[in-house]
Amino acid sequence: MAEQERAEGTVEFLAGLIVGLAISLPAVAWLAPRGTDSLREVVVQRGLIIRRRVGEAVRRPLAQVEQQLERVRGESVDEALAEGRAIAARRWRAVWQSLEHDEGGR
């Protein structure tokens, strides 16, 4: 009895193996590159696609950085110094006025 079950299991295994090979071999043959030239072409095409996608992904942030740099470059050193002096003068006047106000109240 055990021998018979064992023989049936072996037959089922071999039948499954043969059916699996029969189904998978044509699929593998269809999907596999035809030769080195075909493989090279597929690799080159995928490389070009990846290169284009990376270029697009890098271009957007670079454009934003360049815009910000242009804004910063637009200000000259003289303009920045003049603005700093104006701020300092306003603060100095505010401090001076508060000191005069404190002395006048005494």
Image (cartoon, grey):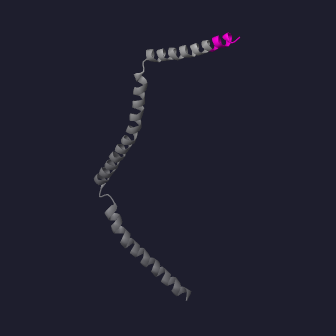
Considering every residue shown, the one lying at the far front of the view is: 105
Q: Is residue 100 magenta?
A: yes
Viewer-proximal residue among 103 and 74? 103
Q: Residue at x 50, y 15 (%)?
A: 86
Image height of 83 relative to 29, above or below: above
Residue positioned 47% across, 14% down in the render = 82
Q: Quadrant of residue 69 in the image?
A: top left
How many numbered marks does the figure carry?
Answer: 0
- Residue 41's place in the image compared with 62, above or below, is below
Give left or right: position of 101 versus 62.
right
Identity of the residue furthest to the right in this view: 106
Q: Quadrant of the C terminus?
A: top right
Q: Position of residue 46 (x, y in %)?
A: 34, 49
Q: Depth check: 54 or 31 in front?
A: 54
Secondary structure character of the magenta stretch overall? helix
Where is residue 62 shown, x and y percent of the image?
40, 35
- Point out the stretch of residues depicted in magenta: 98-106
- Above or below — where is 23 with respect to 42? below
